Amino acid sequence: MNDTVVDIELDYSPRTVFEGFHNRTERWAVIVAHRRCGKTVAVLNDTIYRALTENKENGQYGYIAPYYSQAKSIAWSYLLRFSEPVRKTANQSELWVELINGSKIRLFGGDNPDALRGNYLDGVVLDEMADMKPNLWGQIVRPLLSDRLGWATFIGTPKGHNTFYDIFSKAEQQDNWYVKVLRASQTGILPRDELDDARSMMTEDQYEAEFECNFESAILGAYYGKEMRMLTDQGRITNVEYDPLFPCHSSWDLGYSDDTAIFWFQAVHGEIRVLDYHSSNGENIDYYTNLIKSKEREYGYKYGTHWLPHDARAKTLSSGGKSVIEQIATKIPIETLKIVPNLSLQDGIQASRMALQRAWFDTKCQEGIECLRQYQREYDEDKKVFRDKPRHDWTSHGADAWRYLSIAYREEEKPILKDHSIKGLYVGQTDVTLNEMWAVSPKPRSGRI
Protein backbone atom coordinates (compact mmCIF):
# COMPACT_ATOMS: atom_id res chain seq x y z
CA MET A 1 0.00 0.00 0.00
CA ASN A 2 1.37 3.39 -1.00
CA ASP A 3 1.25 5.83 1.95
CA THR A 4 2.99 8.66 0.12
CA VAL A 5 1.62 12.06 1.13
CA VAL A 6 1.46 14.70 -1.58
CA ASP A 7 0.98 18.37 -0.80
CA ILE A 8 -1.25 20.08 -3.34
CA GLU A 9 -2.08 23.77 -3.34
CA LEU A 10 -5.30 24.85 -5.03
CA ASP A 11 -5.47 28.24 -6.73
CA TYR A 12 -8.14 29.49 -4.35
CA SER A 13 -8.14 31.87 -1.41
CA PRO A 14 -11.53 31.84 0.31
CA ARG A 15 -13.19 35.08 1.25
CA THR A 16 -13.62 35.55 4.97
CA VAL A 17 -17.40 35.15 4.76
CA PHE A 18 -16.99 31.60 3.40
CA GLU A 19 -14.41 30.30 5.90
CA GLY A 20 -17.10 28.98 8.24
CA PHE A 21 -18.76 27.20 5.33
CA HIS A 22 -15.53 25.45 4.31
CA ASN A 23 -14.89 24.35 7.92
CA ARG A 24 -18.42 23.07 8.57
CA THR A 25 -19.14 19.60 9.91
CA GLU A 26 -22.87 19.57 9.10
CA ARG A 27 -24.09 17.31 6.30
CA TRP A 28 -26.50 19.92 4.91
CA ALA A 29 -25.83 23.59 4.16
CA VAL A 30 -27.84 26.54 2.86
CA ILE A 31 -26.34 29.90 1.93
CA VAL A 32 -28.53 32.89 1.06
CA ALA A 33 -26.11 35.27 -0.61
CA HIS A 34 -26.15 38.62 -2.37
CA ARG A 35 -25.08 39.02 -5.97
CA ARG A 36 -21.36 39.04 -6.79
CA CYS A 37 -20.25 37.73 -3.43
CA GLY A 38 -18.45 34.75 -5.01
CA LYS A 39 -20.78 31.95 -3.93
CA THR A 40 -20.35 29.83 -7.08
CA VAL A 41 -16.55 29.94 -6.83
CA ALA A 42 -16.77 29.03 -3.15
CA VAL A 43 -19.05 26.01 -3.56
CA LEU A 44 -17.09 24.62 -6.54
CA ASN A 45 -13.81 24.81 -4.61
CA ASP A 46 -15.51 23.26 -1.61
CA THR A 47 -16.69 20.41 -3.85
CA ILE A 48 -13.19 19.89 -5.31
CA TYR A 49 -11.67 19.77 -1.84
CA ARG A 50 -14.21 17.30 -0.50
CA ALA A 51 -13.98 15.10 -3.61
CA LEU A 52 -10.22 14.86 -2.93
CA THR A 53 -10.32 14.30 0.82
CA GLU A 54 -13.42 12.23 1.57
CA ASN A 55 -11.81 9.05 0.20
CA LYS A 56 -15.00 7.76 -1.38
CA GLU A 57 -14.42 4.86 -3.78
CA ASN A 58 -15.44 6.00 -7.27
CA GLY A 59 -16.65 9.25 -5.76
CA GLN A 60 -19.28 11.16 -7.73
CA TYR A 61 -20.14 14.79 -7.04
CA GLY A 62 -22.55 17.13 -8.78
CA TYR A 63 -23.24 20.81 -9.38
CA ILE A 64 -26.77 21.65 -10.55
CA ALA A 65 -27.84 24.97 -12.06
CA PRO A 66 -31.41 25.76 -13.10
CA TYR A 67 -30.48 25.20 -16.77
CA TYR A 68 -27.79 23.07 -18.38
CA SER A 69 -26.70 26.00 -20.54
CA GLN A 70 -26.38 28.07 -17.36
CA ALA A 71 -24.18 25.44 -15.71
CA LYS A 72 -21.96 25.41 -18.77
CA SER A 73 -21.64 29.18 -19.14
CA ILE A 74 -21.19 29.99 -15.44
CA ALA A 75 -19.55 27.03 -13.71
CA TRP A 76 -17.60 25.07 -16.33
CA SER A 77 -14.74 27.55 -16.72
CA TYR A 78 -14.45 27.84 -12.93
CA LEU A 79 -14.39 24.05 -12.54
CA LEU A 80 -11.64 23.69 -15.15
CA ARG A 81 -9.56 26.48 -13.64
CA PHE A 82 -9.68 25.46 -10.00
CA SER A 83 -9.42 21.70 -10.59
CA GLU A 84 -6.33 22.00 -12.81
CA PRO A 85 -3.72 21.11 -10.13
CA VAL A 86 -5.62 17.92 -9.23
CA ARG A 87 -7.34 17.08 -12.49
CA LYS A 88 -6.65 13.85 -14.32
CA THR A 89 -8.95 14.39 -17.32
CA ALA A 90 -11.96 16.41 -18.46
CA ASN A 91 -14.90 15.82 -20.79
CA GLN A 92 -16.29 19.05 -22.20
CA SER A 93 -19.18 17.45 -24.09
CA GLU A 94 -20.57 15.93 -20.86
CA LEU A 95 -19.21 18.61 -18.50
CA TRP A 96 -17.30 16.44 -16.06
CA VAL A 97 -13.79 16.33 -14.67
CA GLU A 98 -11.99 13.39 -13.12
CA LEU A 99 -9.57 14.12 -10.31
CA ILE A 100 -6.29 12.34 -9.59
CA ASN A 101 -7.94 10.12 -6.96
CA GLY A 102 -10.62 8.89 -9.38
CA SER A 103 -13.45 11.07 -8.11
CA LYS A 104 -15.63 12.83 -10.70
CA ILE A 105 -17.40 16.17 -10.54
CA ARG A 106 -20.14 16.73 -13.13
CA LEU A 107 -22.32 19.70 -14.01
CA PHE A 108 -26.07 19.23 -14.53
CA GLY A 109 -29.09 21.34 -15.43
CA GLY A 110 -32.34 21.30 -13.50
CA ASP A 111 -34.16 21.49 -16.84
CA ASN A 112 -33.03 17.94 -17.65
CA PRO A 113 -33.63 15.88 -14.50
CA ASP A 114 -33.46 12.62 -16.46
CA ALA A 115 -29.68 13.07 -16.73
CA LEU A 116 -29.52 12.64 -12.95
CA ARG A 117 -31.60 9.48 -12.71
CA GLY A 118 -29.72 6.24 -12.21
CA ASN A 119 -26.69 7.95 -10.67
CA TYR A 120 -25.48 8.12 -7.11
CA LEU A 121 -23.96 11.20 -5.52
CA ASP A 122 -21.53 11.66 -2.67
CA GLY A 123 -22.17 15.39 -2.62
CA VAL A 124 -24.12 17.96 -4.60
CA VAL A 125 -24.53 21.71 -4.94
CA LEU A 126 -27.86 23.20 -6.02
CA ASP A 127 -27.13 26.72 -7.27
CA GLU A 128 -30.01 29.24 -7.54
CA MET A 129 -32.45 26.77 -6.04
CA ALA A 130 -35.19 29.40 -6.21
CA ASP A 131 -35.29 29.01 -10.00
CA MET A 132 -35.59 25.21 -10.01
CA LYS A 133 -38.61 22.94 -10.04
CA PRO A 134 -39.73 22.22 -6.48
CA ASN A 135 -39.74 18.44 -6.95
CA LEU A 136 -36.14 18.29 -8.21
CA TRP A 137 -34.70 18.01 -4.72
CA GLY A 138 -37.19 15.69 -3.02
CA GLN A 139 -38.06 13.34 -5.86
CA ILE A 140 -34.78 13.14 -7.75
CA VAL A 141 -31.67 14.49 -6.01
CA ARG A 142 -32.24 13.52 -2.36
CA PRO A 143 -32.60 9.76 -3.09
CA LEU A 144 -29.26 9.82 -4.97
CA LEU A 145 -27.46 10.72 -1.73
CA SER A 146 -28.97 8.04 0.48
CA ASP A 147 -26.90 4.87 0.03
CA ARG A 148 -23.54 6.70 0.30
CA LEU A 149 -24.69 9.28 2.86
CA GLY A 150 -23.85 12.17 0.57
CA TRP A 151 -24.06 15.86 1.48
CA ALA A 152 -25.86 18.79 -0.15
CA THR A 153 -25.40 22.55 -0.32
CA PHE A 154 -28.13 24.95 -1.41
CA ILE A 155 -27.13 28.44 -2.53
CA GLY A 156 -29.01 31.30 -4.11
CA THR A 157 -30.70 34.68 -3.90
CA PRO A 158 -34.31 35.04 -2.67
CA LYS A 159 -37.27 35.03 -5.00
CA GLY A 160 -40.18 35.28 -2.63
CA HIS A 161 -41.69 32.46 -0.58
CA ASN A 162 -40.82 29.43 -2.68
CA THR A 163 -38.97 26.13 -2.27
CA PHE A 164 -35.67 27.84 -1.48
CA TYR A 165 -37.42 29.84 1.23
CA ASP A 166 -38.96 26.66 2.67
CA ILE A 167 -35.56 24.94 2.77
CA PHE A 168 -33.95 27.96 4.44
CA SER A 169 -36.77 28.33 6.99
CA LYS A 170 -36.65 24.67 8.03
CA ALA A 171 -32.84 24.67 8.14
CA GLU A 172 -32.85 27.54 10.66
CA GLN A 173 -34.78 25.33 13.08
CA GLN A 174 -32.54 22.25 12.82
CA ASP A 175 -29.14 21.45 14.31
CA ASN A 176 -27.73 19.38 11.45
CA TRP A 177 -27.70 22.32 8.99
CA TYR A 178 -25.10 24.98 8.32
CA VAL A 179 -27.01 28.21 7.62
CA LYS A 180 -25.54 31.50 6.45
CA VAL A 181 -27.08 34.74 5.17
CA LEU A 182 -24.71 37.10 3.35
CA ARG A 183 -26.15 40.58 2.92
CA ALA A 184 -24.25 43.17 0.89
CA SER A 185 -24.60 45.73 3.68
CA GLN A 186 -22.78 43.36 6.03
CA THR A 187 -20.16 41.48 3.99
CA GLY A 188 -18.21 44.51 2.78
CA ILE A 189 -17.39 42.72 -0.48
CA LEU A 190 -18.95 45.39 -2.69
CA PRO A 191 -18.01 49.05 -2.20
CA ARG A 192 -20.60 51.29 -0.58
CA ASP A 193 -20.58 53.64 -3.57
CA GLU A 194 -21.43 50.71 -5.86
CA LEU A 195 -24.31 49.64 -3.63
CA ASP A 196 -25.67 53.18 -3.50
CA ASP A 197 -25.50 53.41 -7.28
CA ALA A 198 -27.25 50.05 -7.67
CA ARG A 199 -30.00 51.11 -5.28
CA SER A 200 -30.60 54.32 -7.26
CA MET A 201 -31.07 52.34 -10.49
CA MET A 202 -33.22 49.47 -9.14
CA THR A 203 -36.65 49.20 -7.61
CA GLU A 204 -36.76 48.74 -3.85
CA ASP A 205 -37.95 45.15 -4.24
CA GLN A 206 -35.14 44.39 -6.68
CA TYR A 207 -32.46 45.80 -4.44
CA GLU A 208 -33.79 44.16 -1.28
CA ALA A 209 -33.93 40.73 -2.91
CA GLU A 210 -30.68 40.86 -4.89
CA PHE A 211 -28.41 42.60 -2.39
CA GLU A 212 -30.09 42.36 1.04
CA CYS A 213 -31.42 38.79 0.69
CA ASN A 214 -34.97 39.76 1.62
CA PHE A 215 -37.42 36.89 1.04
CA GLU A 216 -40.35 39.26 1.58
CA SER A 217 -39.60 41.26 -1.55
CA ALA A 218 -41.95 40.72 -4.47
CA ILE A 219 -40.79 38.69 -7.46
CA LEU A 220 -40.22 41.29 -10.14
CA GLY A 221 -42.57 40.85 -13.06
CA ALA A 222 -44.61 38.09 -11.41
CA TYR A 223 -48.12 37.92 -12.82
CA TYR A 224 -49.78 36.62 -9.66
CA GLY A 225 -47.54 37.97 -6.90
CA LYS A 226 -50.29 39.79 -5.00
CA GLU A 227 -52.79 36.94 -5.33
CA MET A 228 -50.27 34.29 -4.25
CA ARG A 229 -49.18 36.30 -1.19
CA MET A 230 -52.84 36.68 -0.20
CA LEU A 231 -53.42 32.96 -0.80
CA THR A 232 -50.54 32.11 1.54
CA ASP A 233 -51.39 34.70 4.21
CA GLN A 234 -55.01 33.53 4.38
CA GLY A 235 -54.01 29.89 4.88
CA ARG A 236 -55.60 28.68 1.65
CA ILE A 237 -52.80 26.17 1.06
CA THR A 238 -53.92 23.33 3.30
CA ASN A 239 -55.46 19.85 3.24
CA VAL A 240 -58.35 20.00 0.79
CA GLU A 241 -60.63 16.98 0.90
CA TYR A 242 -62.51 15.64 -2.11
CA ASP A 243 -66.26 16.19 -1.76
CA PRO A 244 -68.12 13.24 -3.36
CA LEU A 245 -71.26 15.40 -3.79
CA PHE A 246 -69.51 17.34 -6.55
CA PRO A 247 -67.74 16.10 -9.68
CA CYS A 248 -63.98 16.34 -10.02
CA HIS A 249 -62.64 18.01 -13.16
CA SER A 250 -59.19 18.22 -14.71
CA SER A 251 -57.50 20.98 -16.67
CA TRP A 252 -54.63 20.13 -19.02
CA ASP A 253 -51.82 21.94 -20.75
CA LEU A 254 -50.26 19.69 -23.35
CA GLY A 255 -46.50 19.72 -23.86
CA TYR A 256 -45.07 18.12 -26.93
CA SER A 257 -41.34 18.74 -26.50
CA ASP A 258 -41.56 19.65 -22.79
CA ASP A 259 -43.98 19.35 -19.84
CA THR A 260 -47.62 18.34 -19.78
CA ALA A 261 -49.33 19.79 -16.70
CA ILE A 262 -52.68 18.78 -15.13
CA PHE A 263 -54.72 20.27 -12.29
CA TRP A 264 -57.57 18.34 -10.60
CA PHE A 265 -60.26 20.57 -9.11
CA GLN A 266 -63.84 20.91 -7.89
CA ALA A 267 -66.17 23.91 -8.17
CA VAL A 268 -68.13 24.11 -4.91
CA HIS A 269 -70.42 27.03 -4.06
CA GLY A 270 -68.17 29.72 -5.47
CA GLU A 271 -64.90 28.08 -4.33
CA ILE A 272 -62.30 26.43 -6.52
CA ARG A 273 -60.93 23.48 -4.57
CA VAL A 274 -57.69 22.31 -6.18
CA LEU A 275 -57.07 18.70 -5.20
CA ASP A 276 -53.94 17.67 -7.06
CA TYR A 277 -51.32 18.60 -9.65
CA HIS A 278 -49.02 16.66 -11.95
CA SER A 279 -46.29 17.68 -14.38
CA SER A 280 -43.97 15.50 -16.45
CA ASN A 281 -42.43 15.30 -19.89
CA GLY A 282 -41.53 12.68 -22.46
CA GLU A 283 -44.64 10.60 -21.76
CA ASN A 284 -47.26 9.40 -24.25
CA ILE A 285 -51.03 9.84 -24.14
CA ASP A 286 -51.57 6.45 -22.51
CA TYR A 287 -49.46 7.56 -19.56
CA TYR A 288 -51.74 10.50 -18.84
CA THR A 289 -55.00 8.63 -19.37
CA ASN A 290 -53.75 5.94 -16.99
CA LEU A 291 -52.86 8.70 -14.53
CA ILE A 292 -56.42 10.03 -14.71
CA LYS A 293 -57.78 6.56 -14.01
CA SER A 294 -55.33 5.95 -11.17
CA LYS A 295 -56.57 9.08 -9.35
CA GLU A 296 -60.11 7.78 -9.77
CA ARG A 297 -59.14 4.48 -8.15
CA GLU A 298 -56.98 6.00 -5.40
CA TYR A 299 -59.21 8.86 -4.29
CA GLY A 300 -62.63 7.80 -5.59
CA TYR A 301 -62.96 10.79 -7.90
CA LYS A 302 -66.21 10.94 -9.81
CA TYR A 303 -65.15 12.78 -12.94
CA GLY A 304 -67.08 15.55 -14.59
CA THR A 305 -65.14 17.23 -17.41
CA HIS A 306 -61.56 16.97 -18.62
CA TRP A 307 -60.71 20.37 -20.08
CA LEU A 308 -58.16 20.42 -22.90
CA PRO A 309 -56.47 23.36 -24.68
CA HIS A 310 -57.65 24.35 -28.13
CA ASP A 311 -54.58 22.81 -29.81
CA ALA A 312 -55.83 19.36 -28.71
CA ARG A 313 -57.88 19.40 -31.93
CA ALA A 314 -54.76 19.51 -34.11
CA LYS A 315 -54.03 16.31 -36.01
CA THR A 316 -50.46 15.09 -36.35
CA LEU A 317 -48.86 12.72 -38.83
CA SER A 318 -46.91 10.95 -36.08
CA SER A 319 -50.20 9.87 -34.48
CA GLY A 320 -51.63 8.49 -37.69
CA GLY A 321 -53.61 11.63 -38.46
CA LYS A 322 -55.39 11.65 -35.10
CA SER A 323 -55.74 14.65 -32.83
CA VAL A 324 -54.85 14.53 -29.14
CA ILE A 325 -58.51 14.61 -28.14
CA GLU A 326 -59.19 11.63 -30.44
CA GLN A 327 -56.31 9.73 -28.85
CA ILE A 328 -57.51 10.49 -25.33
CA ALA A 329 -61.05 9.47 -26.29
CA THR A 330 -59.88 5.91 -26.89
CA LYS A 331 -59.29 5.60 -23.13
CA ILE A 332 -61.59 8.19 -21.56
CA PRO A 333 -65.28 8.70 -22.54
CA ILE A 334 -65.41 11.40 -25.17
CA GLU A 335 -68.49 13.00 -23.61
CA THR A 336 -66.26 14.03 -20.67
CA LEU A 337 -63.76 15.84 -22.91
CA LYS A 338 -64.16 19.52 -23.74
CA ILE A 339 -62.03 22.23 -25.30
CA VAL A 340 -61.41 25.39 -23.25
CA PRO A 341 -62.72 28.55 -24.97
CA ASN A 342 -59.87 30.21 -26.84
CA LEU A 343 -59.58 33.54 -25.04
CA SER A 344 -56.66 35.91 -25.50
CA LEU A 345 -53.65 35.50 -23.22
CA GLN A 346 -54.38 38.73 -21.36
CA ASP A 347 -58.04 37.79 -20.80
CA GLY A 348 -56.90 34.41 -19.54
CA ILE A 349 -54.43 35.97 -17.12
CA GLN A 350 -57.14 38.26 -15.77
CA ALA A 351 -59.42 35.23 -15.33
CA SER A 352 -56.56 33.50 -13.50
CA ARG A 353 -56.17 36.39 -11.08
CA MET A 354 -59.88 36.34 -10.28
CA ALA A 355 -59.88 32.57 -9.85
CA LEU A 356 -56.95 32.72 -7.41
CA GLN A 357 -59.01 34.95 -5.13
CA ARG A 358 -61.45 32.09 -4.50
CA ALA A 359 -59.06 29.11 -4.74
CA TRP A 360 -58.01 26.62 -2.06
CA PHE A 361 -55.01 24.39 -2.81
CA ASP A 362 -54.18 21.02 -1.34
CA THR A 363 -50.57 20.61 -0.24
CA LYS A 364 -50.13 17.95 -2.96
CA CYS A 365 -50.15 20.84 -5.45
CA GLN A 366 -46.87 22.35 -4.24
CA GLU A 367 -45.17 22.30 -7.64
CA GLY A 368 -48.19 23.86 -9.32
CA ILE A 369 -48.30 26.53 -6.61
CA GLU A 370 -44.63 27.34 -7.28
CA CYS A 371 -45.40 27.69 -10.98
CA LEU A 372 -48.00 30.33 -10.17
CA ARG A 373 -45.73 32.15 -7.72
CA GLN A 374 -42.86 32.40 -10.18
CA TYR A 375 -44.72 32.88 -13.47
CA GLN A 376 -43.17 36.08 -14.81
CA ARG A 377 -43.27 38.47 -17.71
CA GLU A 378 -40.38 38.41 -20.13
CA TYR A 379 -37.83 41.16 -19.58
CA ASP A 380 -36.38 43.19 -22.44
CA GLU A 381 -32.75 43.76 -21.52
CA ASP A 382 -32.25 46.38 -24.25
CA LYS A 383 -35.27 48.55 -23.43
CA LYS A 384 -35.17 47.74 -19.69
CA VAL A 385 -38.90 47.04 -19.59
CA PHE A 386 -41.16 44.01 -19.17
CA ARG A 387 -42.82 42.73 -22.30
CA ASP A 388 -46.51 41.87 -22.51
CA LYS A 389 -45.79 38.17 -22.86
CA PRO A 390 -44.68 35.56 -20.31
CA ARG A 391 -41.16 34.25 -19.99
CA HIS A 392 -41.09 30.64 -21.17
CA ASP A 393 -39.53 28.43 -18.52
CA TRP A 394 -40.47 25.52 -16.24
CA THR A 395 -43.39 27.52 -14.79
CA SER A 396 -45.13 28.04 -18.14
CA HIS A 397 -47.10 24.80 -18.46
CA GLY A 398 -48.39 24.78 -14.90
CA ALA A 399 -49.45 28.42 -15.28
CA ASP A 400 -51.15 27.64 -18.60
CA ALA A 401 -53.03 24.71 -17.04
CA TRP A 402 -54.24 27.11 -14.33
CA ARG A 403 -55.28 29.66 -16.95
CA TYR A 404 -57.39 27.02 -18.71
CA LEU A 405 -58.88 25.98 -15.37
CA SER A 406 -59.79 29.59 -14.62
CA ILE A 407 -61.59 29.98 -17.93
CA ALA A 408 -63.40 26.66 -17.63
CA TYR A 409 -64.44 26.50 -13.99
CA ARG A 410 -67.58 28.67 -14.30
CA GLU A 411 -68.95 26.12 -16.73
CA GLU A 412 -68.70 23.58 -13.94
CA GLU A 413 -70.09 25.69 -11.10
CA LYS A 414 -73.71 24.62 -11.30
CA PRO A 415 -76.02 24.25 -8.28
CA ILE A 416 -77.35 20.83 -7.39
CA LEU A 417 -80.90 22.14 -7.03
CA LYS A 418 -82.40 24.97 -9.03
CA ASP A 419 -84.12 27.58 -6.89
CA HIS A 420 -87.43 28.11 -8.73
CA SER A 421 -89.45 31.09 -7.57
CA ILE A 422 -92.79 30.09 -6.06
CA LYS A 423 -95.80 31.32 -7.94
CA GLY A 424 -99.48 31.19 -7.06
CA LEU A 425 -102.00 32.47 -4.55
CA TYR A 426 -101.59 32.55 -0.80
CA VAL A 427 -104.05 32.06 2.04
CA GLY A 428 -105.45 35.40 3.11
CA GLN A 429 -104.77 37.07 -0.23
CA THR A 430 -107.94 39.01 -1.09
CA ASP A 431 -106.94 41.72 -3.55
CA VAL A 432 -106.08 39.52 -6.55
CA THR A 433 -107.62 40.31 -9.90
CA LEU A 434 -108.63 37.76 -12.54
CA ASN A 435 -105.82 38.99 -14.79
CA GLU A 436 -103.25 38.37 -12.04
CA MET A 437 -104.66 34.89 -11.45
CA TRP A 438 -104.39 34.10 -15.15
CA ALA A 439 -100.79 35.37 -15.28
CA VAL A 440 -99.60 32.88 -12.66
CA SER A 441 -101.77 29.92 -13.68
CA PRO A 442 -100.23 26.99 -15.62
CA LYS A 443 -100.96 27.21 -19.34
CA PRO A 444 -102.06 24.21 -21.39
CA ARG A 445 -99.52 22.96 -23.95
CA SER A 446 -100.32 23.18 -27.64
CA GLY A 447 -102.20 20.22 -29.03
CA ARG A 448 -105.17 18.31 -27.81
CA ILE A 449 -105.67 17.63 -24.14
Image (cartoon, helix red, strand yellow):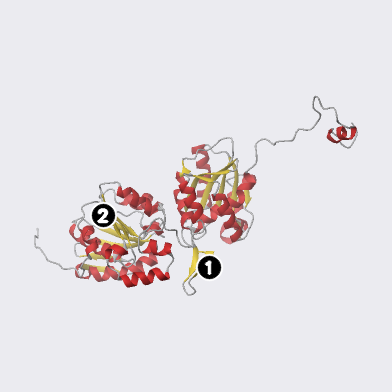
- Relative to residue 284, is residue 336 depicted above or below? above
Residue 26 in view (yes/no): yes
Q: Position of residue 303 (x, y in %)?
A: 58, 41
Residue 444 in view (yes/no): no
Tell me the residue that label 2 is attached to: 122
- Relative to residue 55, is residue 193 depicted above or below? below
Extreme residue in the top direction: 427
Q: Counting residues from the N terminus, which is met first, the one under dot 1 or under dot 2?
A: 2
Mark 1 lies on a secondary structure that is: strand
Q: Would you say 344 lies left or right of 13 here?
A: right
Quarter of the figure with the N terminus:
bottom left
Question: Depth check: 50 or 218 in front?
Answer: 218
Tell me the residue that label 1 is attached to: 387
Q: Would you say 426 lies left or right of 14 here?
A: right
Task: Identify the residue at horizontal 19%, vertical 62% (top origin).
Answer: 101
Q: Position of residue 106 (x, y in %)?
A: 30, 62
Question: Depth check: 267 or 230 in front?
Answer: 230
Residue type, label 1: Arg
Dot 2 alpha-carbon crowd within 10 angstroms: few under 14, some 14 to 19, many 20 or more: many
